[in-house]
Amino acid sequence: MKLLLLLVAALVATGRASSEADTCSGDEAGATSSCGCGKALSRKSTDQLHESEDVPSAAGYANPEKTHEAPENAQLLTLDGGTFLMGNNEPYFPEDGEGPVREVTVGPFMIGKYEVSNRRFADFVAATGYATEAERFGNSFAVEQFISEEIKRNITSSVAAAPWWLPVNGSNWKHPEGPDTNVSDRLDHPVVHVSWNDAVAFCKWSHPHGRLPTEAEWEYASRGGLKGKLFPWGNKLMPKEKHWVNIWQSSIEEKYLKDTNVFKHSFLPIHDAYVFYNSTNTAEDGYPLTAPVDAYMPNKFGLYNTVGNVWEWVSDWHTALHSAEPQTNPKGPASGDNKVKKGGSFMCHQFTCYRYRCAARMPLTPDSSASNVGFRCAADVAQEH
């Protein structure tokens, strides 16, 4: 009870409670919450693109005759493919659909060594004139504690299921925390505020056979050949007491969050999670927000940051229902409402969003964007004739 009173008192002091108007759909509005970056950040069907523009067709960037990204910039690794165990049987998030563990075989494919950076995305925009959906909608979601007081004064609503997320007018890939911020000192960090549609367009421009990876390809690559491990490097979060991933560290966790009988994986009540995400991020891993795409150690396949840092879009439509039978090159359902994003982000923490794992996944509508969602590209391996 003392813990709850302390946290609620801190919440009241912030002056922004979760009873504010909900700006989006909220599937996490119950007694417990996560980082809030699932369906809660989906755009409403009433959202309109500026000037009634349609989303630009990604097919327009797929012409092999057009100039593509230089291979030394794309940094695609060729993987031979193979058979692995996909998913997870631990019921951390039944609604996410991580399980059951099933045997999956993927064929040869190419995948980005790194998440796509701001520098690379800027090259794409310069070459094509592309405008992201966040730019066209005129807003995107950012985390409250990183938004300036001047910008926050004009924000009158938050996400009811996750009130530390605010809709910010003028927030997009060039201005991640609002129009008074920029990426000039983050050019080698992953681009964020990109929708699934934006990611597809970039990948088609980047490589003649460019695309997003399937979820199976992504998870195969993320695991780096390790069988059934939580993380790309094993099961221990900090081997040799070193940070291997960019996730959240809170200034209040030592004082308030050590009672493991109370705070289980990702079951922190929404009010308490609000306090948690408005306490100082101590950045013990080196970064309060995103980290450079080449930060930390690569996995055994050579990929960097497949967990933590930013969520990564994959090509599949989301479903929570999977067959336990062996599968070869699965591509997910033929249609759906939400796409899959993988790997967690810098917002993840054991107590709020235990999704910085290879098997972790969340649904999000393909037109949605936020300051912790990015991607890496894949490509088909060219067939010799």
Image (cartoon, rainbow, N blue to C red):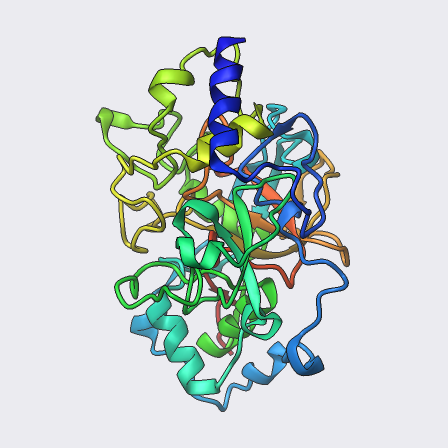
Of the pair 328 and 187, the residue shown nearer to us: 187
At 76% from the left edge and 61% from the top edge, which residue is drawn?
45
Instruction: Left or right? Give the position of 102 relative to 228.
Output: right
At 71% from the left edge and 71% from the top edge, which residue is drawn?
48
For residue 357, say whether it is visible.
no
At 76% from the left edge and 58% from the top edge, which residue is drawn?
334
The image quadrant of residue 104 is: top right
Number of numbered discs visible in the structure rendering: 0
**Residue 193 percent location from the top left of the image:** 50, 61
Of the pair 55 and 333, the residue shown nearer to us: 55
Screen quadrant of the N terminus: top right
Is 275 rendered above or below residue 216?
Answer: above
Of the pair 58 and 290, the residue shown nearer to us: 290
The image quadrant of residue 78 is: bottom left
Is 47 rendered above or below residue 314?
Answer: below
**Residue 140 percent location from the top left of the image:** 55, 61
At 44% from the left edge and 80% from the top edge, which residue is drawn?
125
**Residue 375 percent location from the top left of the image:** 48, 59
Of the pair 126 and 296, the residue shown nearer to us: 126
Instruction: Left or right? Give the position of 234 relative to 23.
Output: left
**Residue 224 percent location from the top left of the image:** 40, 43
